Amino acid sequence: MGRIKAIEFVNDQLRLIDQTKLPLSEEYIVTDDYERIAVSIERLEVRGAPAIGITAAYALALSLKEIKGNVGEIFEIAYLRLKQTRPTAVNLFWALERMKNVFNQAKDKSNIYNDLVNEANAIFHEDQIMCDKIAVNGLQVFRGKAKVITHCNTGSLVTAGGGTALYVIQKAFENNLVEHVYADETRPLMQGSRLTAFELDKLSIPFSIITDSSAAYVIKNVGIDLIITGADRIAKNGDTANKIGTFNLAVLAKHHGVPFYIAAPSSTIDTNCETGKDIQIEFRDSKEINSINGSQITKPGYPVYAPAFDVTPSNLITGIITEDKVFSNDYSF
Ligand code: MRU
């Protein structure tokens, strides 16, 4: 089974699988318009920390595909636009800074666009390599054939390669170390029941979708051996922001003595954040909570509180699997 190509740069156009349509329909957005890509990031048509960074890098390159006006001004407008799409995943800012550094070195060159595309391609290829290394390092955390819970979606849809947490699970499955995966549905946008289930199905890994609120029941009654999730931003002390509900899982893991791991590339570590308190949490539109597929499910106007991420304190995290090694206890990045 071939890997899903969620992001491809072909013929100077970006091709993104529209993740809002999955799993019922496989549709693609093909564009060379950085504004359309910015909107895709905001709508979660492309989502997940590494994918947001890679996509934004290509978008910034595309802003200079046809230069009509002042190069510096065009670049700065596109850079600022992309920077404000989503606040939590640090991969976005990490990728945009890399692109800006290349721009600053090459801004006087006539082929600046090629330099920018080359840098976006480098970010893409490095991400693939990081995924492979994370998956191999992740095998260390298995102590036998495991029943695993994961949250949100962290497979090939959200990286240039095989993924982060879900790729660890895939590699472990290939090594006969996974018995069953329980995929949290991940309210409100259902990244688990729509996307993780879709990826697990394609990989022929046995799974069940569970509601987020059944995690305690499943851990206690089914007997979960391991919980692995991805990350959107990891602070210097190991505090980790990830999809809302991850913190709940970590508390449950501690209570039941289940190892709780994060898998993420180094591009997700933010050494400018000392602790999780410094991480900006995105709040989403109330429509994502009070309606489903465009149908209102509450009385109109009921107040909603919609954080999209939470921060799991490092003392609840057994280890952080990166491309370099599995960090445990000592999270001084
Ligand atoms: O709001 P989303 O769907 O972009 O949130 C994604 C997550 O929280 C993922 O777990 C995280 O980005 C890791 S992706 C490898």
Image (tube, grey):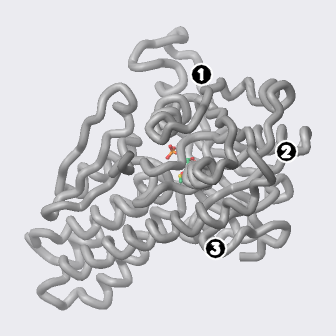
Residue in the picture at 44% in, 51% down: 156
Type of the residue with mark 1: Pro
Q: Is residue 191 visible?
A: no
| Mark 3 CB within 8 Å of ligand 1 | no
Between 132 and 264, the one lying in front of the other is 132
Identify the mark at residue 258; answer none if there is no mark.
2
Q: Nearer the viewer, mark 1 or mark 2?
A: 2
> Disc 2 to disc 3, how far (Cα)?
30 Å
Quadrant for residue 12, please give it.
bottom left
Residue in front for this viewpoint, 287 or 205: 205
Place of residue 164 in the rendered image (x, y in percent of width and height, measured from the top left): 56, 56
Eye-nearest disc, 3 or 1: 3
- Residue 219: in sight, yes or no? yes
Mark 3 residue element: loop
Q: Nearer the viewer, residue 235 or 22?
A: 22
Mark 1, residue position: 303
Whether residue 200 is situated above or below residue 276 in the rendered picture: above
Amino acid identity at mark 2: Val
Cβ of mark 1 under 8 Å from ligand 1: the answer is no
Residue 242 higher or lower than 192, as above or below: below
Query: How many other residues sit within 10 Å of disc 2, few (<14), some (14-19) or many (≥20)?
Result: some
Quarter of the picture holding the N terminus:
top left
Say few, some or many: other residues with alpha carbon within 10 Å of mark 1 (under 14 / 14 to 19 / 20 or more): few
Q: Which residue is mark 3?
A: 272
- Judged left or right of residue 145, residue 175 is left
Answer with the quarter of the image where residue 152 lies.
Answer: top right
Q: CA distance from mark 1 to mark 2?
A: 36 Å
What is the secondary structure assignment of the residue under circle 2? loop
What label does residue 235 carry, if any?
none
Q: Amino acid at mark 3?
A: Asn
Q: Quadrant of residue 333?
A: bottom right
